[in-house]
Amino acid sequence: MGFLRDGQNMLQKQLFSLISLLIFSGLVGCLGPANPADEHPCQLVNNCVYDEVRAQSNCASGYTWENPNDVNNYNCVEIRGAGQTATPDQSGQCPANSTLNADGTQCICDSGFQATSDGTGCELSGGQADGAADNTGNPGNDTPNDGSTDDDDPCPPNSSLGPDGDSCYCDEGYVVNSDGTACVPGESGGSSGDNGGCPPNSSPAPDGSGCYCDEGYVVNEDQTGCVPECTTNSDCDNGYECIENQCRVPPCTPGSCDDGLMCSDSGVCVVDLGSLPSAPATNCNAPSWQCTGTDCGDVVAFEPNLGDGYWDYNLNGESVGDEYRSYIRKEVMMLIKYAAASVNCMGAAWTVGNGEPLGLGDMSEANGDIPGTRENQPGHPEGTHVNGFDMDIAYYQLFGTDNKLRSVCDHVQNGQDQYRCVSEPDNFDVWRTALFFAKMHDSPYLRVIGADGKIGPQIESAITQMCDAGWLPGNSACDSMAVAYETTNQGQGWYNFHHHHFHISTVASPHGLTHPNQGMSCLLPGCEAVPVDYDPRRYLYIPKNRVMCSGAH
């Protein structure tokens, strides 16, 4: 299997699986496809495969570049190892460090590897075990250590070809230079840096699809590194100030908070749950949530995008005309519109909160798949956000000019994202959010609403006070709330990833499919737990400028 080519020096392609593989290569994928009218040189060569969508070239399975160091040479030659392994297994899979040949009958050891003595696998040339690399910069000691490179060795001096056969790793005592093109002397040894090949102040995605700037940092203009989020207040959204190079809610002082808020010891205005806002309007005419047709269970596009009290804005890769993550069951769409319109009317006179429309997040794809499946990157654990039963929704907020899905609390400890609130929320309109929760309870088909462990108790307290004040006559939330949260991790799926949104889940009306988790208060069927490091929600709903372009490699 060859390395991807086009738009990069070959050396940069392999260093920094290393910065190149995770960042620079990603930038190539974001430049857009080449002009289809221009025939690419790869298309004129046997065994060279050209991807017109990604504008990238690669050798067919079982072949590699004739000269990996010549980016203009698109000739592909059959991979030749020190020996051929056994016939592929019944599933057609080859062992590590080998590639199926062109006719699919044999597994060929990758460059720098040789067949094991029993013919069942490939090891580094020179007899070293799989994954063992020396410190000479030479894969398997096959490359001279005089600064020159062997024609068959795609790695630069002071580096070794990794076990995957696709990446070069700096040897002990060497690090990748700032350009990501060579290994130079440095104190931190090992492979591709100690951060998965990502630059300082960033972290790799679990699937290796890109690098993400850490909290408080954003991608620089060249998209090659991460810089402080802000240096002046003008770098921040309205309602935020640049404090310690991060955009934060400005600290309050006694008497500076709006009615219904109090200045906490931490310097943020928080809702004083001891004080209800003014009585809500009672002459509201919200649209009905009740669906009576036979199409109530149909998965439909959420339209219009902007309505009475809500905003289904584009996010997570959506664009105008391609809101592919915004499909929902018709009956659920009607319920959301009803709850949003009710809050917009009932809380119109409230002085607490920014009063802006509620932001709507991920739903399902048009065919009922998990959002992101179309791009081979499902953004949620298996068993949720399928067939239009589920939706992520923003919390109503106190500050700013919109209610998009964003964290409403501090979620970082010791420089590490905890993916949950680690302190009391400081930009959270509890009254409007609680009222929305309550109005969702008007439907008997609500299964559960999940929130963060710091937010759930406030929601329950606010709903209780509204019920006691007679604001919610006949509402089932006054008797039994379908609200779920975890103050400690009990494995129910709510402990992490709900600091920037709450999750609503419904069950079927008499029309359509039944939710796989019907009747349970957990996020996933069977209360299945997903480790944080492997949870696809890890990179959802973070500021756009914190994501390094992660197109095809």
Image (cartoon, rainbow, N blue to C red):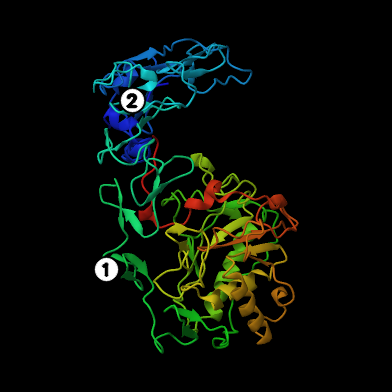
Mark 2 lies on a secondary structure that is loop
The percent coordinates of residue 228 (x first, y second) are: 30, 59
Q: What amino acid is labelled 2 in the image?
A: Thr
Q: Is residue 516 at least partly visible in the picture?
A: no
Question: Which label was assigned to residue 234?
Answer: 1
Please give the name of the residue rendered at 44% of the width and 61% of the height, measured from the top-left corner: 414
Front-most of 322 and 202? 202
Please give the name of the residue rendered at 53% of the width and 52% of the height, measured from the top-left corner: 537
Q: Is residue 16 above or below residue 404?
A: above
Q: Is residue 17 above or below residue 435?
A: above
Q: Quadrant of the C terminus?
A: top left
Q: Closer to the camera: disc 1 or disc 2? A: 2
| Mark 1 neighbour class, 10 Å CA radius: few under 14, some 14 to 19, many 20 or more | few
Instruction: Tell me which label, 1 or 2, sits earlier in the chain.
Output: 2
Q: What amino acid is labelled 1 in the image?
A: Ser
The percent coordinates of residue 68 (x first, y second) are: 31, 21
Q: Is residue 20 at least partly visible in the picture?
A: yes
Left or right: residue 526 versus residue 215 is right
Q: Which residue is mark 2?
A: 136
Front-most of 526 and 375? 526
Left or right: residue 11 versus residue 274 is left
* Whole-number angstrom distance, CA of label 1 to CA of label 2: 50 Å
Please give the name of the residue rendered at 59% of the width and 45% of the height, measured from the top-left corner: 369
Q: Is residue 190 above or below residue 47?
A: below
Residue 378: quadrant of the picture: top right
Looking at the rendered structure, the number of numbered marks drawn on it comes to 2
The percent coordinates of residue 153 (x first, y second) are: 33, 19
Mark 1 lies on a secondary structure that is helix
The percent coordinates of residue 229 (x first, y second) are: 32, 60
